[in-house]
Amino acid sequence: MDMSLIWDLFTNLIQASEHLNIDEDFRKTLIEKRSKLFPLQIGKYGNLQEWYKDFNDFEPHHRHVSHLFGLFPGREISPIETPCFAAAVKKSLEIRGDEGTGWSKGWKINLWARLFDSNHAHKLIREQLNLITADETNYTKGGTFPNLFDAHPPFQIDGNFGGASGFVEMLLQSQDGAVHLLPALPDEWKTGKVTGLKARGGFEIVSMEWKDGKIINLAIKSNIGGNLRLRLPNKIKLMNGVLKPAQGENSNPFYTTEKITCTDNDKAGAQSIQLKPTFEYDLNTQAGKVYEFKI
Protein backbone atom coordinates (compact mmCIF):
# COMPACT_ATOMS: atom_id res chain seq x y z
CA MET A 1 0.00 0.00 0.00
CA ASP A 2 2.84 2.41 0.84
CA MET A 3 4.33 1.97 -2.65
CA SER A 4 0.97 2.71 -4.31
CA LEU A 5 0.33 5.75 -2.13
CA ILE A 6 3.76 7.18 -2.94
CA TRP A 7 3.40 6.37 -6.66
CA ASP A 8 0.08 8.21 -6.76
CA LEU A 9 1.43 11.25 -4.89
CA PHE A 10 4.63 11.49 -6.96
CA THR A 11 2.75 11.02 -10.25
CA ASN A 12 0.23 13.74 -9.39
CA LEU A 13 3.04 16.15 -8.51
CA ILE A 14 5.07 15.29 -11.62
CA GLN A 15 2.11 15.87 -13.92
CA ALA A 16 1.11 19.10 -12.17
CA SER A 17 4.69 20.38 -12.51
CA GLU A 18 4.72 19.52 -16.21
CA HIS A 19 1.39 21.20 -16.98
CA LEU A 20 2.20 24.32 -14.94
CA ASN A 21 5.81 24.40 -16.21
CA ILE A 22 7.25 24.93 -12.73
CA ASP A 23 9.62 23.18 -10.30
CA GLU A 24 11.62 21.37 -12.98
CA ASP A 25 14.41 20.29 -10.60
CA PHE A 26 11.93 18.96 -8.05
CA ARG A 27 10.12 17.13 -10.86
CA LYS A 28 13.34 15.41 -11.93
CA THR A 29 13.93 14.31 -8.33
CA LEU A 30 10.44 12.83 -8.11
CA ILE A 31 10.84 10.99 -11.42
CA GLU A 32 14.12 9.52 -10.19
CA LYS A 33 12.68 8.49 -6.82
CA ARG A 34 9.53 7.05 -8.37
CA SER A 35 11.64 4.81 -10.59
CA LYS A 36 13.11 3.24 -7.44
CA LEU A 37 9.79 2.29 -5.88
CA PHE A 38 9.32 -1.44 -5.38
CA PRO A 39 7.22 -2.53 -8.38
CA LEU A 40 3.85 -4.23 -8.36
CA GLN A 41 4.21 -7.99 -8.06
CA ILE A 42 1.89 -10.87 -8.93
CA GLY A 43 1.97 -13.79 -6.50
CA LYS A 44 1.89 -17.53 -7.04
CA TYR A 45 -1.91 -17.60 -6.86
CA GLY A 46 -2.28 -14.87 -9.49
CA ASN A 47 -3.05 -12.31 -6.79
CA LEU A 48 -1.53 -8.86 -6.29
CA GLN A 49 1.21 -9.35 -3.72
CA GLU A 50 0.67 -7.40 -0.53
CA TRP A 51 4.31 -7.65 0.61
CA TYR A 52 7.72 -7.65 -1.02
CA LYS A 53 7.87 -11.43 -0.59
CA ASP A 54 5.12 -13.82 -1.61
CA PHE A 55 4.09 -14.76 1.90
CA ASN A 56 1.13 -17.02 2.59
CA ASP A 57 -1.67 -15.03 4.20
CA PHE A 58 -2.05 -15.78 7.89
CA GLU A 59 -5.74 -14.87 7.63
CA PRO A 60 -6.71 -15.18 3.91
CA HIS A 61 -10.28 -13.93 4.39
CA HIS A 62 -9.43 -10.86 6.46
CA ARG A 63 -11.57 -7.86 5.49
CA HIS A 64 -8.64 -5.47 4.85
CA VAL A 65 -7.75 -4.86 1.19
CA SER A 66 -5.39 -1.90 1.64
CA HIS A 67 -2.80 -3.17 -0.87
CA LEU A 68 -5.36 -2.72 -3.67
CA PHE A 69 -5.15 1.08 -3.39
CA GLY A 70 -3.58 1.26 -6.86
CA LEU A 71 -6.93 0.39 -8.45
CA PHE A 72 -9.10 2.49 -6.13
CA PRO A 73 -8.86 5.25 -5.14
CA GLY A 74 -5.52 5.34 -6.97
CA ARG A 75 -5.03 5.17 -10.73
CA GLU A 76 -1.88 3.10 -11.06
CA ILE A 77 -3.91 0.01 -12.02
CA SER A 78 -6.55 -0.05 -14.75
CA PRO A 79 -8.45 -2.83 -16.54
CA ILE A 80 -7.89 -0.90 -19.78
CA GLU A 81 -4.22 0.05 -19.43
CA THR A 82 -2.86 -2.67 -17.12
CA PRO A 83 -5.17 -5.70 -17.41
CA CYS A 84 -2.53 -8.01 -15.89
CA PHE A 85 -2.51 -6.10 -12.59
CA ALA A 86 -6.28 -5.57 -12.70
CA ALA A 87 -6.67 -9.34 -13.00
CA ALA A 88 -4.35 -9.74 -9.99
CA VAL A 89 -6.54 -7.35 -7.98
CA LYS A 90 -9.58 -9.41 -8.98
CA LYS A 91 -7.86 -12.59 -7.78
CA SER A 92 -6.96 -10.91 -4.47
CA LEU A 93 -10.60 -9.92 -3.97
CA GLU A 94 -11.76 -13.45 -4.75
CA ILE A 95 -9.33 -14.88 -2.19
CA ARG A 96 -10.34 -12.35 0.49
CA GLY A 97 -14.05 -12.91 -0.15
CA ASP A 98 -17.01 -10.55 0.04
CA GLU A 99 -17.46 -10.48 3.80
CA GLY A 100 -16.66 -7.27 5.65
CA THR A 101 -18.14 -4.22 7.29
CA GLY A 102 -17.74 -0.46 7.24
CA TRP A 103 -14.96 0.92 5.09
CA SER A 104 -13.95 -2.59 4.00
CA LYS A 105 -17.33 -3.30 2.42
CA GLY A 106 -17.48 0.16 0.88
CA TRP A 107 -13.96 -0.20 -0.54
CA LYS A 108 -14.78 -3.56 -2.11
CA ILE A 109 -17.82 -2.06 -3.87
CA ASN A 110 -15.59 0.58 -5.44
CA LEU A 111 -12.92 -1.97 -6.39
CA TRP A 112 -15.40 -4.22 -8.19
CA ALA A 113 -16.84 -1.14 -9.93
CA ARG A 114 -13.34 -0.15 -11.11
CA LEU A 115 -12.98 -3.70 -12.46
CA PHE A 116 -16.22 -3.09 -14.42
CA ASP A 117 -17.79 -6.08 -12.65
CA SER A 118 -21.18 -4.43 -12.28
CA ASN A 119 -23.20 -7.30 -10.84
CA HIS A 120 -20.58 -8.14 -8.22
CA ALA A 121 -20.51 -4.50 -7.10
CA HIS A 122 -24.31 -4.52 -6.93
CA LYS A 123 -24.27 -7.73 -4.87
CA LEU A 124 -22.09 -6.01 -2.25
CA ILE A 125 -24.35 -2.94 -2.22
CA ARG A 126 -27.32 -5.18 -1.44
CA GLU A 127 -25.35 -6.84 1.34
CA GLN A 128 -24.30 -3.48 2.75
CA LEU A 129 -27.95 -2.41 2.86
CA ASN A 130 -28.97 -5.55 4.74
CA LEU A 131 -31.00 -4.52 7.81
CA ILE A 132 -29.02 -5.08 11.03
CA THR A 133 -30.09 -4.55 14.64
CA ALA A 134 -27.69 -3.45 17.38
CA ASP A 135 -27.34 -6.95 18.84
CA GLU A 136 -26.39 -8.50 15.46
CA THR A 137 -23.22 -6.51 14.73
CA ASN A 138 -19.91 -8.25 14.07
CA TYR A 139 -16.77 -7.72 11.97
CA THR A 140 -17.64 -10.04 9.08
CA LYS A 141 -21.26 -9.43 8.15
CA GLY A 142 -21.98 -6.01 6.68
CA GLY A 143 -25.25 -4.21 7.06
CA THR A 144 -27.11 -1.03 7.86
CA PHE A 145 -28.97 0.04 11.00
CA PRO A 146 -32.63 1.21 10.76
CA ASN A 147 -31.39 4.84 10.87
CA LEU A 148 -29.23 4.11 7.76
CA PHE A 149 -25.92 4.29 9.67
CA ASP A 150 -23.39 1.67 8.64
CA ALA A 151 -23.41 -1.31 11.03
CA HIS A 152 -19.66 -1.76 11.54
CA PRO A 153 -19.51 -2.09 15.35
CA PRO A 154 -20.61 0.26 16.80
CA PHE A 155 -20.93 2.51 13.70
CA GLN A 156 -18.56 3.65 10.94
CA ILE A 157 -19.32 6.57 8.62
CA ASP A 158 -16.70 5.20 6.19
CA GLY A 159 -19.21 2.53 5.21
CA ASN A 160 -21.82 5.15 4.30
CA PHE A 161 -19.34 7.31 2.41
CA GLY A 162 -17.73 4.31 0.71
CA GLY A 163 -21.08 2.89 -0.35
CA ALA A 164 -22.16 6.23 -1.82
CA SER A 165 -18.85 6.46 -3.68
CA GLY A 166 -19.43 2.96 -5.04
CA PHE A 167 -22.82 3.98 -6.45
CA VAL A 168 -21.13 6.82 -8.35
CA GLU A 169 -18.21 4.67 -9.60
CA MET A 170 -20.76 2.32 -11.18
CA LEU A 171 -22.31 5.23 -13.12
CA LEU A 172 -19.31 7.47 -13.82
CA GLN A 173 -15.52 7.15 -13.79
CA SER A 174 -13.01 9.72 -15.00
CA GLN A 175 -9.59 8.55 -13.75
CA ASP A 176 -8.61 6.62 -16.87
CA GLY A 177 -8.25 9.14 -19.68
CA ALA A 178 -11.93 9.82 -20.40
CA VAL A 179 -15.33 10.59 -18.89
CA HIS A 180 -16.54 6.99 -18.78
CA LEU A 181 -20.33 6.79 -18.46
CA LEU A 182 -22.11 3.67 -17.15
CA PRO A 183 -18.82 1.76 -16.74
CA ALA A 184 -20.29 -0.78 -14.31
CA LEU A 185 -24.06 -0.74 -14.80
CA PRO A 186 -25.63 -3.83 -13.16
CA ASP A 187 -28.48 -5.79 -14.67
CA GLU A 188 -30.78 -4.47 -11.93
CA TRP A 189 -30.23 -0.88 -13.13
CA LYS A 190 -30.88 -1.38 -16.87
CA THR A 191 -33.08 1.70 -17.01
CA GLY A 192 -32.61 4.85 -14.95
CA LYS A 193 -31.70 8.50 -14.64
CA VAL A 194 -29.18 10.48 -12.60
CA THR A 195 -28.32 14.17 -12.18
CA GLY A 196 -25.51 16.20 -10.69
CA LEU A 197 -22.53 13.84 -10.96
CA LYS A 198 -19.14 15.50 -11.49
CA ALA A 199 -16.07 14.34 -13.38
CA ARG A 200 -12.47 15.48 -13.39
CA GLY A 201 -11.70 18.62 -15.36
CA GLY A 202 -14.78 20.55 -14.26
CA PHE A 203 -17.35 18.49 -16.17
CA GLU A 204 -20.79 18.14 -14.61
CA ILE A 205 -23.38 15.58 -15.66
CA VAL A 206 -26.42 17.84 -15.58
CA SER A 207 -28.57 14.83 -16.44
CA MET A 208 -28.12 11.34 -17.84
CA GLU A 209 -30.90 8.95 -18.80
CA TRP A 210 -30.47 5.39 -20.01
CA LYS A 211 -32.74 2.57 -21.17
CA ASP A 212 -31.81 -1.10 -21.57
CA GLY A 213 -28.24 -0.18 -20.69
CA LYS A 214 -27.93 2.48 -23.41
CA ILE A 215 -27.68 6.23 -22.85
CA ILE A 216 -30.62 7.94 -24.56
CA ASN A 217 -30.35 11.51 -23.20
CA LEU A 218 -27.32 13.31 -21.81
CA ALA A 219 -26.49 16.90 -20.81
CA ILE A 220 -22.98 17.89 -19.68
CA LYS A 221 -21.82 21.29 -18.46
CA SER A 222 -18.20 22.28 -18.98
CA ASN A 223 -17.27 24.59 -16.12
CA ILE A 224 -13.70 25.42 -17.23
CA GLY A 225 -13.59 24.36 -20.89
CA GLY A 226 -11.15 21.97 -22.52
CA ASN A 227 -11.41 18.71 -24.41
CA LEU A 228 -14.22 16.40 -23.33
CA ARG A 229 -13.50 12.78 -24.16
CA LEU A 230 -16.57 10.63 -23.70
CA ARG A 231 -16.43 6.85 -23.30
CA LEU A 232 -19.90 5.31 -23.64
CA PRO A 233 -21.61 1.93 -24.06
CA ASN A 234 -23.40 3.07 -27.24
CA LYS A 235 -23.19 5.58 -30.07
CA ILE A 236 -24.58 9.03 -29.36
CA LYS A 237 -25.15 12.29 -31.26
CA LEU A 238 -24.41 15.87 -30.23
CA MET A 239 -27.39 18.19 -30.59
CA ASN A 240 -26.49 21.19 -32.79
CA GLY A 241 -23.04 19.89 -33.60
CA VAL A 242 -20.86 16.98 -34.63
CA LEU A 243 -18.90 14.66 -32.37
CA LYS A 244 -15.50 13.46 -33.54
CA PRO A 245 -14.23 9.94 -32.86
CA ALA A 246 -11.48 10.10 -30.23
CA GLN A 247 -7.93 9.91 -31.51
CA GLY A 248 -4.62 9.60 -29.70
CA GLU A 249 -4.04 10.83 -26.17
CA ASN A 250 -6.61 13.06 -24.52
CA SER A 251 -5.32 16.65 -24.83
CA ASN A 252 -7.05 17.67 -21.58
CA PRO A 253 -4.33 17.90 -18.89
CA PHE A 254 -6.75 16.61 -16.25
CA TYR A 255 -6.85 13.32 -18.17
CA THR A 256 -3.15 12.59 -18.54
CA THR A 257 -2.49 8.92 -17.87
CA GLU A 258 0.77 7.34 -16.78
CA LYS A 259 1.73 4.08 -18.40
CA ILE A 260 3.20 1.19 -16.44
CA THR A 261 4.07 -2.01 -18.24
CA CYS A 262 2.97 -5.57 -17.68
CA THR A 263 5.80 -8.05 -18.11
CA ASP A 264 5.30 -11.23 -20.12
CA ASN A 265 5.16 -13.21 -16.87
CA ASP A 266 2.46 -10.90 -15.52
CA LYS A 267 0.18 -11.21 -18.57
CA ALA A 268 -0.89 -14.79 -17.87
CA GLY A 269 -4.08 -13.99 -15.93
CA ALA A 270 -5.09 -10.84 -17.80
CA GLN A 271 -7.72 -12.69 -19.83
CA SER A 272 -9.94 -12.85 -16.72
CA ILE A 273 -10.72 -9.13 -17.20
CA GLN A 274 -13.65 -8.74 -19.58
CA LEU A 275 -13.96 -5.35 -21.31
CA LYS A 276 -17.29 -4.46 -22.87
CA PRO A 277 -17.27 -2.63 -26.23
CA THR A 278 -17.32 1.15 -25.87
CA PHE A 279 -17.43 4.20 -28.14
CA GLU A 280 -15.15 7.21 -27.59
CA TYR A 281 -15.69 10.77 -28.79
CA ASP A 282 -13.83 14.07 -28.45
CA LEU A 283 -15.45 17.48 -28.09
CA ASN A 284 -13.65 20.79 -27.57
CA THR A 285 -15.80 22.57 -24.96
CA GLN A 286 -16.18 26.17 -23.85
CA ALA A 287 -16.35 27.23 -20.20
CA GLY A 288 -19.88 27.60 -18.87
CA LYS A 289 -21.59 25.93 -21.82
CA VAL A 290 -24.00 22.97 -21.57
CA TYR A 291 -23.84 20.30 -24.27
CA GLU A 292 -26.77 18.03 -25.02
CA PHE A 293 -26.64 14.58 -26.56
CA LYS A 294 -29.19 12.04 -27.76
CA ILE A 295 -29.08 8.50 -29.07
Image (tube, rainbow, N blue to C red):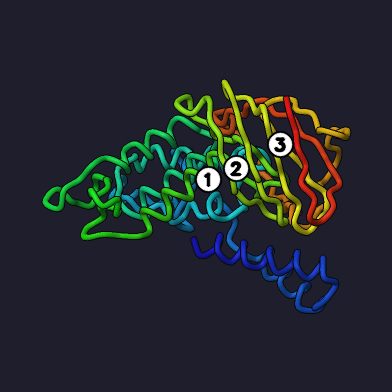
The vertical placement of 134 against 272, above or below, is below
Q: Nearer the viewer, residue 148 or 72?
A: 148
The quarter holding residue 30 reads: bottom right
Which numbered dot is residue 206? none
At 42% from the left edge and 55% from the top edge, which residue is drawn? 161
The quarter holding residue 243 reads: top right
The extreme left residue here reads 135
Q: Secondary structure at mark 1?
A: helix
At 32% from the left edge and 50% from the top edge, which residue is drawn? 63
Alpha-carbon distance for marks 3 and 2?
A: 10 Å
The vertical placement of 125 against 294, above or below, is below
The quarter holding residue 153 reads: bottom left
Residue type at mark 1? Val
Query: In the image, 18: left or right of 115?
Result: right
Horizontal and vertical percent position of residue 213: 58, 24
Dot 3 alpha-carbon crowd within 10 angstroms: few under 14, some 14 to 19, many 20 or more: many
Q: Nearer the viewer, residue 101 or 3?
A: 101
Horizontal and vertical percent position of residue 223: 75, 57
Alpha-carbon distance for marks 1 and 3?
A: 16 Å
User: Which circle's residue, 3 or 2, is located before the other in the chain?
Assistant: 2
Query: In the image, 149: left or right of 247?
Result: left
Pointer 1 residue? 168
At 88% from the left edge and 33% from the top edge, which residue is drawn? 242
Pointer 2 residue? 172
Residue type at mark 3? Arg
Which tag is nearer the camera, tag 1 or tag 3?
1
Horizontal and vertical percent position of residue 115: 54, 38
Pointer 3 residue? 231
Q: Nearer the viewer, residue 114 or 7?
A: 114
At 63% from the left edge and 25% from the top edge, which residue is drawn? 214
Q: Secondary structure at mark 3?
A: strand
Residue type at mark 2? Leu
